[in-house]
Amino acid sequence: MPSVDITLSLSLDQCRSYYAGAVESIQTYTLDGRRVRFPARALHRLVSHDGVHGHFRLYFDGHGRFTTIVPLDAMRR
């Protein structure tokens, strides 16, 4: 399964706009500079009291469709 690593730093206010449905997808850059987009709904389980911050791995299926996001810190445990 193809994957890319990203860094996110989103405030709680930014995350609220995703919850409200004002934003359908997140566009960011991978650690190696490629542009990537994934559904905003993927952030729901990652939002803390101060937003979403950290390094994450995005996984995609064989057709390039987003499947899941995993915090990289959780993978190191």
Image (cartoon, rainbow, N blue to C red):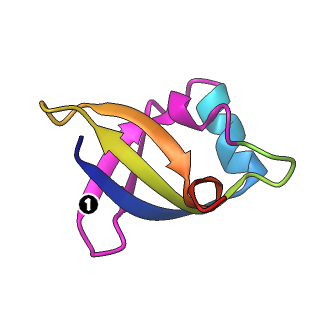
Image quadrant assignment for residue 16: top right
- Kindly identify which residue carries mark 1: 35
**Residue placed at 48% from the left, 42% from the top?**
69
Instruction: Classify mark 1: residues with Cα within 10 Å, few (<14), some (14-19) or many (20+).
Output: few
Counting every numbered tag in the picture gives 1
Q: Position of residue 34 (x, y in %)?
A: 23, 66
**Residue placed at 27% from the left, 74% from the top?**
33
58 sits left or right of 47 in the view:
left
**Residue placed at 35% from the left, 65% from the top?**
29
Nearest the eye: 21 or 72: 72
Range of residues picked out in magenta = 20-46
Q: Amino acid at mark 1?
A: Arg
Indicate whether residue 35 is drawn in magenta.
Answer: yes
| 56 shown above or below 30 | above
Q: Position of residue 22 (x, y in %)?
A: 55, 30
Image quadrant assignment for residue 65: top left
Image quadrant assignment for residue 59: top left
Quarter of the figure that contains the N terminus: top left
Nearest the eye: 75 or 37: 75
Q: Secondary structure at mark 1?
A: strand
Q: Position of residue 73 (x, y in %)?
A: 63, 61
